[in-house]
Image (tube, rainbow, N blue to C red):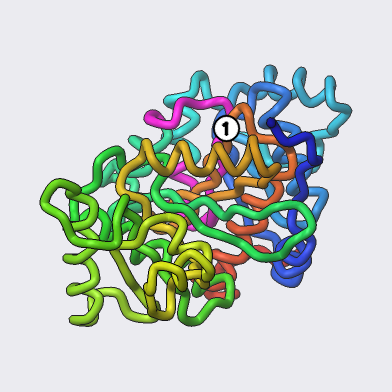
Amino acid sequence: MLSTTPKECPARLLAQARQHPRVTTVVINPINEVSLASARMASEQGLIEPILVGDIDTMRRQAEIIDWSLDQVRLVQAADETEAARLGVALVSQNEAHSIMKGHVHTDILLRAVLNKAAGLRTDSRLSHVFYMTVPGSDKALCITDAVINVQPSVLDKLHIARNAIGFMHALGKDEPRVALLSGTEEVSKSMPSSQDAAELVKLAAMGALPGAVVEGPLAFDNAVSPEAAAIKGITGKVPGQVDILLVPNLESGNFLFKQMVYFMGATAAGLVLGARVPIILTSRADPPEARLASCALASLYCAHQLSPALVQAS
């Protein structure tokens, strides 16, 4: 049942990202082989200009294992992961870097440094994560949000999550993404809070709270992704069967969904944390190289859209 199809970094995504200058990226505590190899791969593919923040002796020893010379790479000494997160975020706040990549560091430590008011990276938006899911042999992408950060989001939280995802799709060239507000039913029911949240979000979208997108819901998963299922059930609209963004009810449902796509369909799950001043490449130890590279490509495109050319380091 598990997919044995080799993972792919979408060729079109990589080609699109390579059209833009490298983005100077702080890599937080890359003191193991996996995180260093990810930074090296993204650098060699022309996506990032890495700044490695961690214990320099350890990084050099690990780099020797993968035969990567760090002579031309900027290294910043940090005693541990907490200091690495603080110093890396400080480089971004000083405009010396314009994206952040997670290395061997706990996610809560990294995000705590990002959210520290003194760092100046907070915005009016709540942090949220967007997965950019692709399957081998197809350039069609499906975004899932939020399956990583917001555990049980309120309606207001979901409004922020939707805005972040819509802005993300705009950065990738999708002017009016279609957003499905997922629930277990198409009917608003008091017994299913996610359906009530979806109805409230649709009202807010109609009032202009989510510009630049088509937002519909509540929608069950089958009707969001399958035009045939929607037609059989008589569900009409611009989103059913044409969805770009699946806004899930909570982290658990999103986590199950993206992992099913990865393990049953061979999907590549690239993604970013959004809502801060810069994108955060939040990779997992279980991520294959293709997903790590695709995530860096997403960060490159997002920066090219959000930042003025003067702030992005030339190739």
- Residue at x-position 61% and y-position 66%: 301
Residue 276: which quarter of the image? bottom left
Q: Amino acid at mark 1?
A: Ser
Q: Is residue 83 above or below residue 178?
A: above
Pick the front one: 259 or 308: 259
Number of numbered tags placed on the structure image:
1
On the image, the x and y values in percent for residue 113 come to: 36, 37
Residue wearing tag 1? 284
Q: Is residue 19 above or below residue 292?
A: below
Residue 17: which quarter of the image? bottom right
On the image, the x and y values in percent for residue 193 come to: 17, 49
Q: Is residue 79 left or right of residue 208?
A: right
- Residue at x-position 57% and y-position 25%: 104
Magenta-colored span: 89-109
Pick the front one: 203 or 77: 203
Q: Is residue 166 above or below residue 294?
A: below
Q: Quadrant of the N terminus?
A: top right
Q: Is residue 245 left or right of residue 96?
A: left
On the image, the x and y values in percent for residue 11 come to: 79, 61
Q: Residues within 10 Å of mark 1 (few under 14, many from 20)?
A: some
Q: Residue furthest front?
A: 232
Pick the front one: 106 or 77: 106
Q: Is residue 308 left or right of residue 8?
A: left
Whether residue 307 can be seen here = no
